């Protein structure tokens, strides 16, 4: 089975693993910059240190929307940006709904709706 290919906003093509690895590097950089250890970040999002390490390496996707929001809180990443990046870094067969393509207004509506619904459960940090 051929790996699913994505085209970045800059026009570069990458596969799912490359996309996850790029996201993992950004998450790690922000975690380090925010002064948290990987063990602290794992505890904050509710997973094992091993699983969290796999997210930063790009070998595992972020499990769900509440986890994305908790991760945004601990890394100081923008919640909307992280949700979109994490959603795009998941195997499409593993998602209940596929994000519309970049540029489609339904994409932003769906992301805003997801943030609105789940932000009640995982509010941003003050």
Image (cartoon, grey):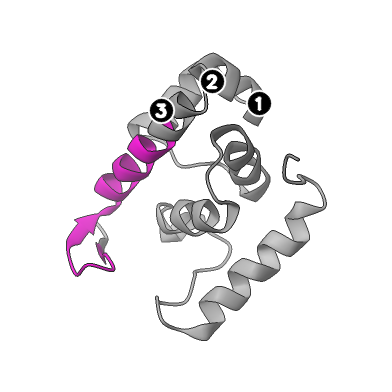
Residue 58 position within the rendered picture, expressed as x and y whole percent measured from the top left: 35, 36
Local secondary structure at mark 1: helix
Neighbour class for label 3 at 10 Å: few (<14), some, many (≥20)?
A: some
Q: Is residue 22 left or right of residue 2?
A: right
The disc at residue 93 is none
The N terminus: image quadrant: bottom left
Q: Is residue 66 left or right of residue 61?
A: right
Distance of label 2 from label 1 (alpha carbons): 10 Å
Q: Earlier in the sequence, mark 3 or mark 2?
A: 2
Q: Nearer the viewer, residue 96 or 109?
A: 109
Neighbour class for label 1 at 10 Å: few (<14), some, many (≥20)?
A: some
Label 2 near label 3: C-beta < 8 Å?
Answer: no
In percent of the image, x 40 and y 52: which residue is there?
89
Label 1 near label 2: C-beta < 8 Å?
Answer: yes
* Viewer-side label of 3, 2: 2
* Viewer-side label of 3, 1: 1
Q: Which residue is mark 1?
A: 44
The disc at residue 54 is 3
The C terminus: image quadrant: top right
Q: Is residue 38 left or right of residue 21?
A: right
Residue interval drawn in magenta:
6-28
Q: Residue furthest right?
A: 120
Inspect the magenta stretch and tell me whether residue 2 lies in it.
Answer: no
Residue 2 position within the rendered picture, expressed as x and y whole percent measured from the top left: 19, 58
* Viewer-side label of 2, 1: 2
In percent of the image, x 28 and y 45: which residue is there?
17
Residue 113 in view of the camera? yes
Label 1 near label 3: C-beta < 8 Å?
Answer: no
In percent of the image, x 63 and y 30: which residue is there?
45
Q: Which residue is mark 2?
A: 36
Distance of label 3 from label 1 (alpha carbons): 16 Å
């Amino acid at each position: 089975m051929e790996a699913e290919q994505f085209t970045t906003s800059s026009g570069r093509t990458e596969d799912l693993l490359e996309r996850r690895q790029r996201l993992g590097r950004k998450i790690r950089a922000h975690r380090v910059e925010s002064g948290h250890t990987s063990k602290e970040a794992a505890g904050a999002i509710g997973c094992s240190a091993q699983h969290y390490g796999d997210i930063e390496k790009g070998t595992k996707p972020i499990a769900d929307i509440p986890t994305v929001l908790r991760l945004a809180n601990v890394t100081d990443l923008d919640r909307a940006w992280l949700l979109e990046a994490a959603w795009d870094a998941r195997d499409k067969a593993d998602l209940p709904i596929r994000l519309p393509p970049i540029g489609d207004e339904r994409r932003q509506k769906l992301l805003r709706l997801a943030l609105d619904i789940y932000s009640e459960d995982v509010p941003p940090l003050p």
